[in-house]
Image (tube, rainbow, N blue to C red):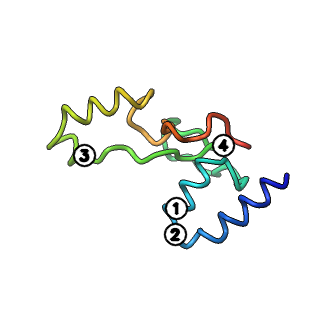
Amino acid sequence: EKLERIITQKWLAIFPEGQEAWSEFRRTGYPRLFPVVVNNSGGLIDTKIQIRRLPFPQNEYNTNAAEVQSAISLLGGPDNGGTRLWWDVNKGNF
């Protein structure tokens, strides 16, 4: 509980830096956020854990397809927002 409070305060402090706050949330699983009410991902992203990464843009597929496929093979999952990155926590604190 103490760690959760500390990390929640850190998240609030870095929230203006959206990318940093999102990374902290994914790294630690804190703060505890409410699940998404409407899931528009077609079931690709669990509403309890929320989006974990951004998929590669279409431009990257068009101009660098071989390397994109190589990178996707290292992800451990498909190229969508529900696939965790290597530093993302294995289990959320949800």
- Closer to the camera in the image, 11 or 63: 11
> Nearer the N terminus, badge 2 or badge 4?
2
Structural distance between the alpha carbons of marks 2 and 4? 23 Å
Structural distance between the alpha carbons of marks 3 and 1? 24 Å
> Nearer the N terminus, badge 4 or badge 1?
1
Picture coordinates of residue 39, whole percent (x, y): 56, 46
Q: What residue type is labelled 1?
A: Glu
Q: Rate crowding at label 4 as few (under 14), some (14 to 19) or many (20 or more) other CA atoms within 10 Å.
A: some
> Nearer the N terminus, badge 3 or badge 1?
1
Q: List the residue tagged with mark 1.
A: 20
Q: Rate crowding at label 2 as few (under 14), some (14 to 19) or many (20 or more) other CA atoms within 10 Å.
A: few
Q: Which amino acid does label 2 sit on?
A: Glu
> Nearer the N terminus, badge 4 or badge 3?
4
Q: Which residue is drawn at 29% across and 48% down?
A: 57
Picture coordinates of residue 36, whole percent (x, y): 63, 51
Q: Which residue is drawn at 62% across and 34% down?
A: 90
Q: What residue type is labelled 4?
A: Lys
Q: List the residue tagged with mark 4.
A: 48
Q: Which of marks 2 and 4 is in front?
A: 2
Q: List the residue tagged with mark 2.
A: 17
* Mark identifier at residue 58: 3
* Mark identifier at residue 90: none
Q: In which quarter of the image is the C terminus?
A: top right
- Closer to the camera in the image, 75 or 44: 75
Q: Which of marks 3 and 2 is in front?
A: 2
Q: How many labels does the image show?
A: 4
Let me know if residue 94 appears in the view.
Answer: no
Structural distance between the alpha carbons of marks 4 and 3? 27 Å
Q: Residue at x 69, y 52 (%)?
A: 30
